[in-house]
Image (cartoon, coloured by chain):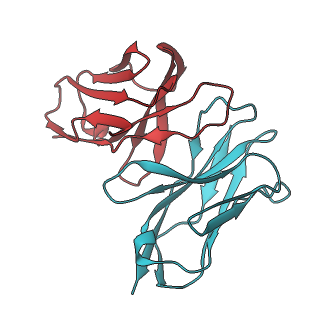
Chain colours: A cyan, B red
Amino acid sequence: GDSVTQMEGPVTLSEEAFLTINCTYTATGYPSLFWYVQYPGEGLQLLLKATKADDKGSNKGFEATYRKETTSFHLEKGSVQVSDSAVYFCALTPTGGGNKLTFGTGTQLKVEL
Amino acid sequence: DTAVSQTPKYLVTQMGNDKSIKCEQNLGHDTMYWYKQDSKKFLKIMFSYNNKELIINETVPNRFSPKSPDKAHLNLHINSLELGDSAVYFCASSQGLGTVSPLHFGNGTRLTVT
């Protein structure tokens, strides 16, 4: 079945550091890929998405590029802020939609001053 | 004007009890979901309804019974609660099937079974 693998956390960075959170997936066909973010005490929010190979999703300074050849969707940000501290989830839905999201295990990010 | 709202936010109960969690969305979405998040933050889908019809029913004990009285509501009833049911339960909604639309999540219900 479909699966998503993320790097384990927590990831601890200083403010203004560069962020990469790795995500790879296993799925047939051409799934749609997502990053969701969960702030403490809240539900998940969509951060960005990409629906086909080579698409780049971006939002709030975060970016991720859908790489079919490496089955990856790594999340990057050039300069993190303390307010970016949260848990980040990579996820996919199968080819054709259906909205059955398969999530990775989440990566906790802590940004310190 | 919360988009997806769940009640209660916290639920503490004893083993063997029966409890319900309610969810409502005001986004006009057709599809609603229940997800379970365990203590390690792992999220797994439990159920999904589209226009009040059950479309996803993962391997969940039959002590868990979802009910959708209309497409804006999806409630979760749990019978004979067990310690292992302790988790955070998230309700979510999205536009109809066959489209790639993001899920909108509620803020979760933290269930603690003692």
Give the residue drawn at x 44%, y 18%. B71
Q: Which residue occupies 28% across, 24% down? A: B78
Point out the residue furthest to the front here: B1
Q: Give the number of marks.
A: 0
Looking at the rendering, in which quadrant would you find the C terminus of chain B? Answer: top left
* Residue A31 image position (x, y, % from top left): 74, 42
- Which quarter of the picture shows residue A93? top right
Residue B75, position in %: x, y?
33, 23
Foreground residue, B71 or A40? Answer: B71
The correct choice, above or below, for B107 with respect to B21 in the image is below
Residue B68 to residue A4: above or below: above
Point out the image quarter for the N terminus of chain B: top left
Residue B107 sits in quarter = top left
Seen in the image, is B113 located left or right of residue A97?
A: left
- From the top left corner, tell me how far across and down residue B82 is, in percent: 25, 32
Figure quadrant of residue B26: top left
Q: What x and y, as percent, mark residue A27? A: 74, 42
Residue lying at the far right of the rendered structure = A69
Whether residue B78 can be seen here: yes
User: Which residue appears at 68% of the width and 48% of the height?
Assistant: A33
* Residue drawn at the location 61% of the way across and 33% of the way down: A99
The answer to whether residue A74 is visible is no
Instruction: From this view, report whether residue B71 is shown above or below residue B4.
Output: above
Left or right: where does residue B31 sit relative to residue A34? left
